[in-house]
Amino acid sequence: MEEDFKPGEPVIEVRDLYKSFGDLHVLQGVDLTVTKGENMVVLGRSGTGKSVLIKIMIGLLKQDRGDCLVLGKEVSKLDGNDLRDLRLKIGFSFQNSALYDSMTVRENLEFPLVRNIKDLTRAEINEQVESVLDAVGLLQTINQVPAELSGGQRKRIGIARTLILKPEVMLYDEPTAGLDPITCLEINELINEVKEKYQTTSIIITHDLTCARETGDRIAMLLDGKFLKTGTFEEVFDTDEERIKSFYDYNFIQ
Ligand SMILES: Nc1ncnc2c1ncn2[C@@H]1O[C@H](COP(=O)(O)OP(=O)(O)OP(=O)(O)O)[C@@H](O)[C@H]1O
Ligand SMILES: [Mg+2]
């Protein structure tokens, strides 16, 4: 049975989540709800556990306790085909998402399609590759190899490769890391276009406040293992909390 989520309904629900690695207590009671069609930004300094959190959401890591439901399913209880089915509905754009260097853009995009969906005709594959490349504005690069693309273009192709399986949920891990400010703005726009075009529910992990402001319907600020504050950009940063203020100053007064 497929569940259809309507705007406002929770697609990702994290409740009182804990995760430690030995003596390192990374997540210590995380709560987060992301509703259908929403862009949720997760902000936090390096090493606060942002990537760990989304790895739990796709079942690459298991929490020590607490709940993590994605599309209505407790991820830690899934295995085999059920986990595979869930992952097919989640587009995961890795922090260092690498394209295959020896393959053209077309081949890079065909790869997840052919591997995950059987019985597609050549015409259907071509149509889907071209449609998704068009969506990220890079149709002209179809026959190029990654080495011939800019960093921003590679990032876009990485996002296109994720979109090709028509995910319901998108998890972006530092989509603008290492890109120049203009390219960052393009990636922010792309994230917003993806939301409009595919009605995805997304988590955007970043420590780039411009990206947070441009893409986030809501922002959640991870500090010391918990979300200290969740709300719109203005709500989160209109505060006397020193740690949030210093995060803001650090970003905008450099
Ligand atoms: N599989 C693992 N085994 C042991 N420690 C881990 C593991 N994964 C993550 N950690 C530790 O957990 C902490 C949080 O890591 P995480 O990758 O979530 O940070 P992050 O918030 O994504 O940081 P960044 O902004 O640098 O990407 C780090 O101290 C990291 O070393
Ligand atoms: Mg990370």
Image: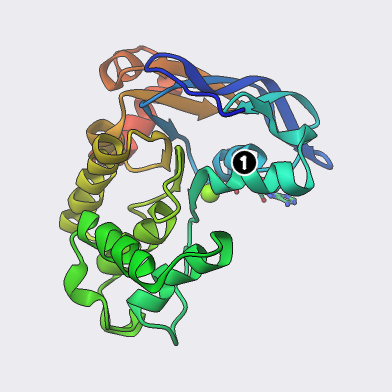
Viewport quadrant of the N terminus: top right
State the residue in front, 244 or 19.
19
Q: Position of residue 91 (x, y in %)?
A: 48, 48
Q: Position of residue 98 (x, y in %)?
A: 47, 70
SS assignment at label 1: helix
Q: Which residue is mark 1?
A: 86
Total label count? 1
> From what the image shows, is residue 254 above or below residue 37?
below
Q: Residue at x 62, y 41 (%)?
A: 86
* Residue 29 occupies quadrant: top right
Q: Residue at x 26, y 59 (%)?
A: 131
Q: Position of residue 213 (x, y in %)?
A: 25, 31
Q: Position of residue 206 (x, y in %)?
A: 40, 42
**Does the numbered disc 1 mark a residue whose Cβ is under 8 Å from ligand 1?**
no
In this picture, residue 7 sits left or right of residue 223: left
* Residue 210 occupies quadrant: top left
State the residue in front, 223 or 119.
119
| Residue 178 appears in the rendering | no
Q: Residue at x 81, y 31 (%)?
A: 64
Q: Amino acid at mark 1?
A: Leu
> From what the image shows, is residue 96 above or below residue 145?
above
| Residue 77 appears in the rendering | yes
In this picture, residue 35 sits left or right of residue 67: left
In this picture, residue 30 sits left or right of residue 139: right
> From what the image shows, is residue 137 above or below residue 121?
above
State the residue in front, 151 or 209.
151
Q: Residues within 10 Å of mark 1 (few under 14, many from 20)?
A: many
State the residue in front, 7 or 20.
7
